[in-house]
Image (cartoon, rainbow, N blue to C red):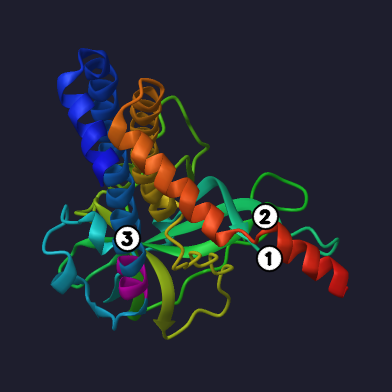
Amino acid sequence: MHQVRAVLKALGQDGRWRRPLALAIVFAIGCGLLSWWQWARYRETAEANALVIANYSATPRPLTDVLHSLTAYRADQQWTQVTVTGRYLPAEELLVRNRTNDIGDTSDGDSDGDEAGFELLVPLLLPDGDVFVVDRGFLPVGSTQDRPDVVPDPASGSVTVVARLQADEGPIPGRTAPAGEIPSIDLKAVAQHVGRPTYTAAYGLMVDETPPAATDPQQLAPPTFSDDEGMHVSYAIQWIAFAVIAFTALFWSVRRSLSDAGDPDVLEAEIRAETRRAARAPSDESVEDALLER
């Protein structure tokens, strides 16, 4: 305790240590801010994971209860399940180019089983005349042409669809597509193609429909759920540790300087520490006796 007071006294009165002390304080503040930032990222990641899991498994709700207008959508509504009833407009369907679908492990054991192809967008005409865009699934590239070999027809007549909400992707600047295709899920472009009032902020990934179609596209691979929030907590702790190390190094440097200068409090503390170490160490006689007994 005496040497701690001596170090603190030196830091407060000896001008030589003001600059190192200021640098240590600034460094510690920076470490604290970086630690707080990593903790905030951890909280954001944890909340986002919890939200995705909650939305994905929640009971489906009517579309109009979730989206109150054609342009309504919030980021925290992603993966929310909705139900909507209408009839498909197969004449207005569009293929989204340059899409992939994870089909799992391939036959050669490669875990990267992404297959190239298209996603099939089919507008669903609701009873009030509005259109909700349904992504009915994935179609692989054809065997002989850059289009699916077969585009399955949706069910005719009234259909009740369960879908998970996804945000509009918007256009890709400079990207074009042949007739009947679209470069991205750009809902404003789909609305212009359909020529009817359309939900343009969100569309639905089909989960189920009643009655079912004779043939469906491949279901898109579900998102990967994980309760792993990454290394943010570890990094937050490390930044605090760096701040502690900085002050520890400063304390050791001041104490060493005081010892070299013959400060009585520091020298007394060193003598007491040496005495304790000697008391704990075995004597030469006890070491010799132990050797003889062996």
Left of 120 or right of it: where is 253? left
Residue stretch in magenta: 51-56
In this rendering, the answer to whether 58 lies above or below 133 is below
Instruction: Tell me the SS state at disc 2.
Output: strand
Q: Of callouts 1 and 2, which one flags the residue occurring earlier in the amino acid sequence?
A: 1
Q: Residue placed at 15% from the left, 25% from the top?
A: 12
Cα–Cα gap, marks 2 and 3:
28 Å
Cα–Cα gap, marks 3 and 1:
25 Å
Residue 106, visible in the rendered structure: no
Membership of 45 in magenta stretch:
no
Residue type at mark 3? Ala
Mark 1 surroundings: few (<14), some (14-19) or many (≥20) residues within 10 A: some
Q: Position of residue 232 (x, y in %)?
A: 40, 51
Instruction: Tell me the SS state at disc 1.
Output: loop
Residue beneath disc 2: 115
Instruction: Tell me the SS state at disc 3.
Output: helix
